[in-house]
Amino acid sequence: MLRRKERNLENIPVGALGLIPVRGCEGLGDKVNDYLVKWRKESGSEHKGDVAFTGYDRDTFIIDADVPRFGSGEAKGIIKESVRGKDLYLMVDVCNYSLTYSLTGNTNHMSPDDHFQNLKRIIAAVGGKGRRINVIMPFLYEGRQHRRKKRESHDCALALRELSDMGVSNIITFDAHDPRVQNSIPLNGFDNFFPTYQFLKALIKSVPDLRVDNDHLMIISPDDEGAMSRAVYFSNILGVDMGMFYKRRDYSTVVNGKNPIVAHEFLGDSVEGKDVIIIDDMISSGDSIIEVATELKRRKAKRIFAAATFGLFTNGLKQFDEYYEQGLISKVLTTNVIYQTPDLLSRPYYINVDLSKYIALMIDKLNYDHSISELLDPNAKIQNALTYYRKYHK
């Protein structure tokens, strides 16, 4: 399990800790706050009376902030308590479309653009009074528009430059579509985390008869771009084979902003009789996952598990329900770092991968300017988990 080790007191906190979940990220923010409050109450007595640890132990680290809107739809950021000298961590979920606001009497659902603007409003409200500003943005805003082709905008790079210009020191994200976009802000901190350990832990807990060895399990990459490196890492760390599909697209047409997929071609060893894990950064419409799962079943794969950091499910859950009932897909795993609908959480095939403790560990370490390399590379934790699992599941 991920554990908070004893503090190395060679360092003192960068500043008193402050957590600001921007509107739409309150649920995840509350869970992260609960861990931080619990841990620091347990060790707070050690630092009583030490001026360097002022504000170390509090009933809550959440700063009271809001983004109210006028009837015209315009908005402003408000911080309702002092942030002077604090080490601030702003959390934002740009994918939370469940939130609405009134625009001249009409109801508008918040888009990623709205959430990003709200983030900037809160940073502006800080007004340079914080000791340091860190942004935790699990789904990187405009991350799918990560590079420029011909005459088009490069939205992700522009957004990162904006945050840098506003004084943000560190940007923390998960499973960036293309982490090379950080090259647009070479003098700023940019950490990209992969929840590999959390996926494995959640899967073996929910599927106790899963056999993690080369004869019974295989990792599948659904495409030959970003997902490839993810699948290679996962297969190497588990010691199992990997296969991949590459997408043949029709580049002469554009549908819903992208070139439609003509066919999925498979490269790899036989999947017959094996459980397979399809690993990707996101499930958007879900079409690619369904098509890959269909191809794997046609090749006589046993059980199919689909794991993705972000579950957008832009076309709803109907096709996943149908394919689960037909036995095409056994489990779907996504994390809680973006909005999850009550319908999704109620599905029998859905496994919710909770990253709140993981994020709390990051914040706790970063507040001390400690290394987070062990969180970025969870190899040791995965091997320990596998050793324990294999011992009791022979």
Image: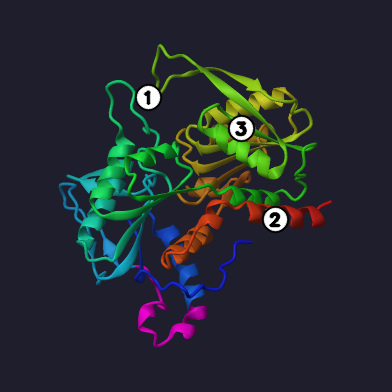
Residue receiving disc 1: 257
Q: Position of residue 165 (x, y in %)?
A: 23, 49
In the rendered image, residue 51 lying in the magenta stretch gets the answer yes
Depth check, mark 2 against mark 1: the one in front is: 2
Residue 109 marker: none
Q: Position of residue 350 (x, y in %)?
A: 60, 45
Mark 2 secondary-structure assignment: helix
Residue 322 marker: 3
| Residue at point 47%, 34% (across, down) | 284
Given the image, on which type of amino acid does mark 2 rest?
Answer: Ala
Mark 1 secondary-structure assignment: loop
Furthest-bottom residue in view? Answer: 49
Q: Is 339 on the left-hand or right-hand side of 240?
A: left
Q: Earlier in the sequence, mark 2 or mark 1?
A: 1
Disc 1 crowd, CA 10 A, few/some/many (<14, 14-19, 20+): few
Disc 2 crowd, CA 10 A, few/some/many (<14, 14-19, 20+): some
Furthest-top residue in view? Answer: 252
- Residue 285 in view in this figure: yes
Depth check, mark 2 against mark 3: the one in front is: 2
Residue 385 marker: 2
Q: Position of residue 376 (x, y in %)?
A: 53, 52
Q: Which residues are magenta?
A: 41-62
Quarter occupied by residue 230: top right
Mark 3 secondary-structure assignment: helix
The residue nearer to you, when weighing 262 against 245, is 245
The residue nearer to you, when weighing 104 against 30, is 30
Disc 3 crowd, CA 10 A, few/some/many (<14, 14-19, 20+): few
Q: Position of residue 236 (x, y in %)?
A: 67, 40
Given the image, on which type of amino acid does mark 3 rest?
Answer: Glu
C-alpha separation, residue under disc 1 versus residue under disc 3: 27 Å
